[in-house]
Amino acid sequence: MAVDMTDLGKRTKAAAKILAKAPTDQKNKALLGLAGILGKDRQPILDANAGDVSAAGAAGLAPGLIDRLTLTPARLDGIAADLRKVIDLPDPVGERYDESTRPNGLHLWRQRVPLGVLGVIYESRPNVTVDVAGLAIKTGNAAILRGGSETIHSNRALVAAVHTALRAADLPEDSVLFVDDPDRARVTELLALDEWVDMIIPRGGGSLHRFCREHSRISVITGGVGICHLYVEQSADQTRSIEVIHNAKTKRPSVCNALDTVLVERAAAAEFLPMVVARLEKDGVTFRAHENALPFLGNPLPASVQAAGPEDFDTEWMALILGLKVVDTLEEAIEHIALHSQNHSDGILTENRDHAARFLAEVDSAAVYVNASTHFTDGAQFGLGAEVAISTQRLHARGPMGLRELTTYKWAAEGDYLIRA
Amino acid sequence: MAVDMTDLGKRTKAAAKILAKAPTDQKNKALLGLAGILGKDRQPILDANAGDVSAAGAAGLAPGLIDRLTLTPARLDGIAADLRKVIDLPDPVGERYDESTRPNGLHLWRQRVPLGVLGVIYESRPNVTVDVAGLAIKTGNAAILRGGSETIHSNRALVAAVHTALRAADLPEDSVLFVDDPDRARVTELLALDEWVDMIIPRGGGSLHRFCREHSRISVITGGVGICHLYVEQSADQTRSIEVIHNAKTKRPSVCNALDTVLVERAAAAEFLPMVVARLEKDGVTFRAHENALPFLGNPLPASVQAAGPEDFDTEWMALILGLKVVDTLEEAIEHIALHSQNHSDGILTENRDHAARFLAEVDSAAVYVNASTHFTDGAQFGLGAEVAISTQRLHARGPMGLRELTTYKWAAEGDYLIRA
């Protein structure tokens, strides 16, 4: 039977009101209880996941995808450890800031409060179910979770564990509800629940983000897609620059902060481009070189290099592939990035302080770097402790979204029967 | 000929890139130039406005509406004075905050940057044209302005003045573009320009906000509608409470922070309700009393009091009308507000500190008050210096939106050829 999404919306909204008032200790108790279940009472979760894994095998899913949806005791231990880290993070709810007393005596401050209800739409990895549930509970937000159909049994078991933990902490089970229905029509219905849901967080590729943006009446956190650039100037330390490029490309090529394109200042191209190829091809990287970079790469070209096609500089590779292009000036580098970046993470490698400052000022991305790897764009790396998403949109939050970015604020004011003159 | 909205989108986006880099002095020079034109070279503006006023008279508009769209030398002086206040406000663009150095040596901070392009949709008052242009320029944002058709000649002349001032400051005229076309189809087209416009700000009534929310692919700042409450407890100083109620209701009844409903604790009702009626009816206020309040108001009822109808507690009065209702407990007051408030401004009058704290924590409005008038919800009153809108939504900004709320941030980071371990 189809899940009634309106019912889910009403129930999470009602739960959100209770959760918003819950003290930190009570929310942490639920998280600790959940971590305990994942560590000790996990057989039902592992059994449910085994069902998903065998169904995925029967359906002929690629081994990489099957690996993504597989839970093991060690992976559950890792998820539980992440939950314990969230317990240790400060609770943003209730924090006062911008406090002042106006000349008329009005005592005024902003006070952080939960957003309300989060709608989270994601794909295969079942760890997202626990990560999001944990971050939502910690920040006093209720959540409606819509995971991928290929992990529906795992998610059902994981949400049952969340409910057990909520109940044991005297918090409403409806704080975290799961769309237990693989029909894609439920996604469209979720996006229309603007009366009850306050924010939509898609976690997946560009097509999921576009779908949400086009069909949602609720604010959508757009992100998850990065075409990331590093621009190398002649003044840079070339040996160290190559290690930064190597890190940004190869450390974890399948994530959105991985490097996609290297731009090289023309004066450095003859020396630098062959060095990049030599260093990175050893680790399996192949290259798509702009026609202006080809003359610097040898004749015949190394086997790892091919001429770039028309779409290559607009492609997020998610793989050990790297675009190479020569630019004449800083301006041309900034212009290339403006045209091709998804405004995620872009950087410059240089010893020229003026150019570094101009790059930071003029490149309009969620994270901009001088002499550092784009792979740093991450909530934990930025000291946020955890991350629910990386936003590449402009409103509300930009870049890694931690606990604070899952809150809003209210203005609170006190007077002595104060009237406005 | 129909205005090409895509062309407007592209032109403002291009101008926004230049404006985003403009130093504070250059932006202030444009504002100062505009203030000068409004003060000295204003005859073309007054002439254009006279055309709108006579057309409005011929069309039979109500005198109150004609007054709203009329510009006089004194009103232009007031608009110019407001611009000069904006010049004196600090420029939020470029501000660094949350600066830190991570254990690995990554130097990291958030840096305020303009949002990009604002789409502002408003109704009759032509002063909004200058207010919004001034706040946009100051914050480095470009803007597309869509004013009411009844002020199209005034707005054309005012935007010409804006362009003159921008040109004199060497800033692109396209920083502020005006939809010089009264066809309502242009509004729908504006709401679809998600490729170029970053935020939609409707300034008008609830129906305009709903229209924008339902038709926009761009984030909309919802607000402008307030059904505001004050809850009076027996413990409150009753004489002073009445002055707060009087201020919140009568100071400016047509604005969104004006009081709509007074809730009175039952134990205080017999004494307090007749005092409220006696004090406010002298200034022309009439009352809509819930059936549970009627017994406290005399028999026969005063001429100013009538029984409330079914919609009255869901009506934003915008007039000298006040709802009255008795509640038994704080919980019942909070519950009434949760059902009927538009989450704008709500307050409690009490000497009970526990109740005050619970009210502040549990009433989920953009501004919550203890012993103060709801009429304080205003950018200038809150020390923001100016205000582009009052948001009642939860994401990005809540309550009065000043200069800072017209910005976003980027993460900037510097390392010494730093790689992620």
Image: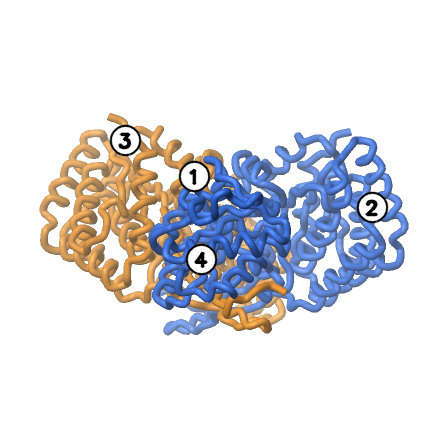
Chain colours: A blue, B orange
Left or right: B66, with A257 as reference point: left
Q: Chain of mark 3?
A: B
Quadrant assignment, res B83: bottom left
Measured in 3D between alpha carbons, the distance from the residue under mark 3 to the one under mark 1, in whole angstroms, is: 17 Å
Q: Residue at x 76, y 60 (%)?
A: A31
Assess whether mark 3 and mark 4 are in contact (beta carbons under 8 angstroms).
no
Q: Which residue bears the numbered disc 4?
A: A271
Give the residue number, with chain letter if any, for mark 2. Answer: A157
Quarter of the figure with the C terminus of chain B: bottom right
User: Residue flagged by tag 4: what amino acid is it?
Assistant: Glu
Residue that appears at 37% across and 74% down: A103
Residue at point 54%, 64% (across, down): A111
Residue A42 drawn at (x, y percent): 87, 53
Residues at discs 4 and 2 both on one chain: yes
Question: Which label is found at residue B194?
Answer: 1
Q: Amino acid at mark 1?
A: Asp
- Which numbered dot is residue B3? 3
Residue A145 placement (x, y as % from top left): 69, 44
**Amino acid residing under circle 2:** Ala
Nearest to the eye among marks 4 and 2: give it: 4
